[in-house]
Image: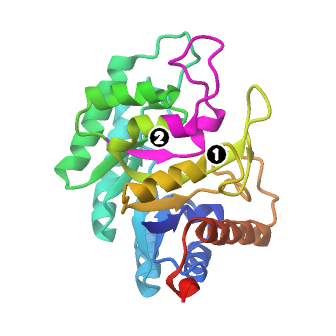
Amino acid sequence: MILTGFTDEASSDVNEQIRVTKELGWKYLSARTMGSANIHDLSEADFEKVCDQLASNHIKVAEFGTLIGSWSKSIESDWQLTLKEIQRCVPRMQRLGVQYARVMSYGQKPWGEDQMEQERFKRLKEIVARFNDAGLTAAHENCMNWGGFSADHTLRLLEEIPNLKLVFDTGNPIFQRDRSKPAPHPWQNAFEFYQKVKHAVVHIHIKDGIMHAEEGEPEYTFAGEGNAQLDQIMEDLKRSNYQGFIAIEPHIGKVFHLNDQKEMDAQRIYNLYKKYGLKFEKRYFTKVEDTQ
């Protein structure tokens, strides 16, 4: 297993993202917001600057956390917006030697409305095909998108798009109702979701938390301290000899999708991200030097 993380949760500054990665002793970071924008939305000049910063520090990129088909985009949004994102993303991934692009199946409509499933399948097929044609892998994440409604919804995506691969996020089931089960739709079970889809999983995101209310944001916790059943998931990954990336996405100091965090203390955010990485590694991995 190779450890990485969404370093924009430590800082939006690329130099700080690189610094925290090196302080953790890791060789990779997961690229999402790099400076002023998502990595596939940066200007060419800013993207080249990021490439130079990474290269000079010998840090590689594990994945692009793209906005392609994201939970924030309606299935009724202009398809040309998605195409342009793909067209920007592919050459940048090739430039940095990145295999994986995290994608989604567009935002969930309120349950009970027409979810426009066929349009989602059509678009995701095209997204996956365009990445595959470039020798790259578009991996779908179980977030607040159609595939995130339940493990069965993700399995349906795998049926409709046979060459689709998955990112499994351990924390997203915590705040999602299982829409494959009868009303009142219980909270999803993270380990149950993982077990159903693990045959197609090529990448892991690590979050944990506790859902206290009937809606809204959970209380995010350090890995293994919430309801994501991380001990069971990590044990199964080791037993299955999973050799891929595991990316921390703490949501403790900074939550990527929330906008009311501008006044937060930058050093505290940085320190919490680093602490999360250290605690995660200590809990789930034994370094060689610790056994001597």
Q: Which region of the structure is painted magenta?
A: 165-192
Q: Identify the amino acid type marked 2.
A: Tyr
Query: Where residue 57 is drawn, which disc sits there?
Result: none
Q: Identify the amino acid type marked 1.
A: His
Tell whether 264 sits left or right of 225: right
Q: Tell me what residue is drawn at x 41 percent, y 16 percent.
A: 116
Asked if 177 appears above or below 163 in the picture, the reply is above
- Give how far across and how far down residue 11 sits, in percent: 65, 67
- Give how far across and how far down residue 8 sits, in percent: 60, 62
Query: Where residue 257 is drawn, which disc sits there?
Result: 1
In this orientation, does residue 57 appear?
Answer: yes
Report the number of numbered marks: 2
Q: Tell me where residue 274 sits by quadrant.
A: bottom right
Q: Tell me what residue is drawn at x 55 percent, y 49 percent.
A: 232
The residue beneath circle 2 is 194
Tell whether 106 sits left or right of 266: left
